[in-house]
């Protein structure tokens, strides 16, 4: 009965609010609906408001109810639509790539402010390529590379470079075994490596645990800074003099991460918080 009148934005939003009330807060349901109207109908924010009572194609209403069913069973909207926005650009994402987080956008802004023409930059654990592609977009005069252990992620990242019209050099490789391969030297290394401890799973959203790639997220409780240690070692071998190292970090491990970087001889350490006032990123220089 309800379904027969569900053919306007107004109706569809009400339907989503009802169906998803146990899965998301109302404000989030409204913003997910907005994403769908913008992505699928190509409506602007103003269209959404002005055309909320316009009769829509039946095929869109059908698609919308399918999307709501997937959301109800826990799928993230970014994987359902196969794309997302990051730092003002569009990125393809799939089950092999972590969904870019807004705090990573803050890290990118920090790196952006430190780049000069001609610098060579490496993004380690590039995933969707969101960091590398955004930096290449902001600095076409720099040479940007991205590496990931997942060949599937690198395929997505390279499509993301193409769709955003930028040049990035991609490679598949395991940074934990970096000695086994040949590398260039870089002026800047940036990484958002896996940093969530297995024991932190209990406090995480079901959506993340079930659908996002666990290799992108988790580290053993016994060695949570594993990637930071190896990347610090990598930097000592492959960063140029006065080169910069940027990390996104686990908010609970800021002090330990800084100590580790100091132990490896990095200087001018700086820790910054994200928009939630959590310790989230560090920068250091190799003197
Ligand atoms: N850079 C993306 C972002 O910020 O959204 C993805 C970051 S995700 C937290 C970590 C990435 O590191 C994943 O894409 C994962 O495949 C990659 N990774 C995990 N182990 C790795 C390894 N040993 N060597 C290289 N990359 C690795
Ligand atoms: N911030 C991510 C999360 O929300 C974790 C990213 C990472 O492990 N580097 O789970």
Image (tube, rainbow, N blue to C red):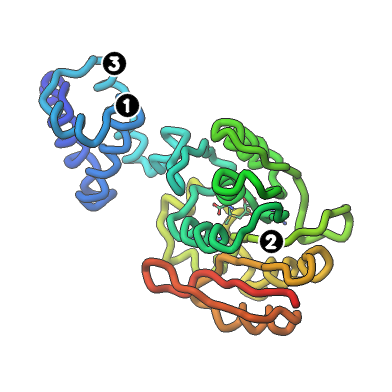
Residue 276, percent across and down? Answer: 37, 68
Find numbered disc 1 in the image and state the secondary structure of the residue it sits on. loop
Query: Who comes first in sequence, dot 1 or dot 2?
Result: 1
Front residue (pair 277, 200): 277
Distance in Å between CA atoms under marks 1 and 2: 37 Å
Q: Which residue is mark 1?
A: 42
- The residue carrying pointer 3 sits among few (fewer than 14), some (14 to 19) or many (20 or more) residues within 10 Å by Cα, namely few
Discs 2/3, front: 2
Query: Who comes first in sequence, dot 3 or dot 1?
Result: 1
Q: Assess whether mark 1 and mark 3 are in contact (beta carbons under 8 angstroms).
A: no
Q: Quadrant of residue 122?
A: bottom right
Q: Residue furthest front?
A: 117
Q: Is residue 235 above or below residue 5?
A: below
Q: Is residue 196 left or right of residue 286?
A: left
Residue 146, percent across and down? Answer: 69, 48
Q: Residue at x 53, y 38 (%)?
A: 94
Q: Is residue 225 above or below residue 68?
A: below
Find numbered disc 2 in the image and state the secondary structure of the residue it sits on. strand
- Ligand 1 image-quadrant field: bottom right
Disc on res. 59: 3
């Amino acid at each position: 009965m309800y379904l027969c009148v569900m053919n306007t934005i107004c109706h569809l939003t009400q339907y989503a609010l009802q169906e998803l009330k146990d899965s998301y807060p109302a404000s989030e349901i409204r913003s997910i609906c907005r994403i769908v109207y913008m992505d699928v109908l190509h409506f602007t924010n103003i269209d959404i408001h002005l055309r909320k009572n316009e009769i829509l194609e039946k095929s869109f209403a059908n698609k919308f109810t399918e999307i709501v069913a997937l959301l109800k069973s826990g799928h993230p909207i970014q994987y359902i639509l196969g794309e997302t926005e990051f730092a003002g650009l569009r990125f393809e994402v799939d089950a092999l790539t972590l969904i870019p987080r807004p705090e990573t956008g803050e890290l990118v802004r920090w790196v952006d402010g430190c780049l000069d023409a001609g610098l060579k930059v490496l993004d380690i654990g590039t995933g969707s390529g969101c960091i590398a592609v955004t930096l290449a977009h902001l600095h076409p005069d720099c040479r940007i590379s991205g590496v990931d252990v997942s060949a599937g992620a690198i395929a997505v990242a390279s499509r993301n470079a193409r769709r955003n019209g930028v040049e990035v050099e991609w490679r598949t490789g395991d940074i934990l075994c970096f000695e086994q391969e040949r590398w260039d030297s870089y002026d800047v290394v940036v990484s958002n490596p896996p940093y969530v401890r297995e024991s932190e799973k209990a406090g995480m959203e079901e959506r993340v645990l079930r659908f996002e790639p666990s290799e992108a997220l988790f580290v053993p409780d016994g060695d949570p800074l594993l990637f930071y240690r190896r990347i610090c070692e990598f930097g000592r071998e492959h960063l140029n003099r006065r080169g910069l190292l940027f990390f996104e970090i686990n908010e609970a491990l800021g002090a330990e991460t800084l100590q580790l970087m100091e132990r490896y001889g990095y200087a001018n350490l700086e820790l910054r918080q994200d928009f939630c006032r959590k310790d989230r990123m560090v920068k250091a220089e190799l003197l």
